[in-house]
Amino acid sequence: MKVGVFWRKFRNVEQQMKLTPDKVYDDAYEEAYHHYSALKSAGYDVTLIEWRKDPRKTYENITKEKVDIIFNASSFKEITFLETFGIPYVGSGIDLVSLNKAQRKEIVAYNKLPTPKFIIADDPNNIPEINLNYPLFVKPIKGRGSAGISEENIIYKYDDLPKVVKKITEKIGQEALIEEYIEGREVTVGIIGYEDPIVLPIVEIKYNSAKTNTFEHKMYDREIINCPADFTEEIEKRIKTTALNIYKSLNAKDYSRIDMIVDKEGIPYFLEINTFAGLTMASEKDEEGKMKIHHGYMGYAAKAAGMSAPEFLSKILESAIGRYGMKESKKITS
């Protein structure tokens, strides 16, 4: 079995580049090479596949390399391409990937799982009536990697709202999701598998001289990470159970990360599911001290669960292999 690891330039920062092009670094290749190396160490026959603007060239490369399954697909366009050509891939399908944050929240709420109330705005001069409790939090409806997130996104009064909506709608080019800001502890829960999902240890994200997880705070690894997070047994069980129910209700596949805020009463509120969650288990800088690769939150959780990178990524890959009913023959024979 041959595994193709996708990589695409600027895949993690393409939205933020619209706002601060001078403050982003591209770790797409380093991230993919991390996955390539881990799967190779696990005994798989692996190759790197660069995603090209012309999908025909990507398909030619996949065919030439005789790839059986794709790892690290990271966008709706890539998933659509793989579905069109009938190429097996790791991760959630079009049914989930195509949904924006609001649609996902609606499904979660329909399943009677807690999520902050929200509205959507597409015009800073025509914001719908606000029947929400302040403070509010505003973010891109299809955001990624904390793109467009700064402390000004926490809204304490209406007069500050149009400016942030304008930033998102005009500079990023997306609708703005406006939701109630829940005071509490930010956590994220990684889950692996499909038929019998494994819930990883809870990661708590604390802010280092910041009020929220801004782009710079997250992508430059400035957070304070606690994993496993320190909760009572009762609240830990509640968080994990809620995360697993969200994972299943959204029909996530193979791996995802559930972002939540745990309020003062210990209620975990769903914020977002990351179907292309970062899986790197290291944070690296170059000789000049500039970031080379960002440490993934699921990587922290995997470490806390006692997994090495080869074990961690193999479990994710094996979930997809089993889901497709493919024969697992990973060892390279000499």
Image (cartoon, rainbow, N blue to C red):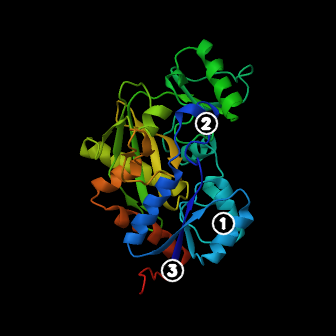
Amino acid type at image mark 3: Met
Check the image and report above or below for 316 versus 148. below
Q: Residue at x 63, y 72 (%)?
A: 62
Would you name the residue on which mark 1 appears?
A: 82
Please provide percent x and percent y for residue 64. Answer: 64, 76
Residue placed furthest toward the front: 287
Please provide percent x and percent y for residue 59. Answer: 69, 69
Q: What is the spatial separation of the Cα atoms under label 1 and label 3, in whole angstroms?
A: 17 Å
Question: Which image quarter holds the C terminus?
Answer: bottom left
Q: Check disc 1: other Cα within 10 Å, few if <14, some if 14-19, many if 20+.
A: some
Q: Check disc 2: other Cα within 10 Å, few if <14, some if 14-19, many if 20+.
A: some
Check the image and report above or below for 98 versus 183. below
Q: Is residue 299 left or right of residue 270?
A: left
Amino acid type at image mark 2: Met
Q: Secondary structure at mark 2?
A: helix
Cβ atoms under marks 2 and 1 closer than 8 Å? no
215, 237: nearer the viewer: 215
- Which label's residue is closer to the chain start, 1 or 3? 3
Nearer to us of marks 1 and 3 is 3
Amino acid type at image mark 1: Leu
- Which label's residue is closer to the chain start, 2 or 3? 3
Residue placed furthest toward the bottom: 334
Please provide percent x and percent y for residue 123. Answer: 73, 25
Q: Residue at x 65, y 29 (%)?
A: 168
Q: Which mark is residue 1?
A: 3
Q: What is the spatial separation of the Cα atoms under label 2 and label 1, in whole angstroms?
A: 26 Å
Q: Which mark is residue 17?
A: 2
Please provide percent x and percent y for residue 147. Answer: 56, 36
- Which label's residue is closer to the chain start, 2 or 1? 2
Instruction: Say whether residue 166 is visible.
Output: yes
215, 332: nearer the viewer: 332
Q: Secondary structure at mark 1?
A: helix
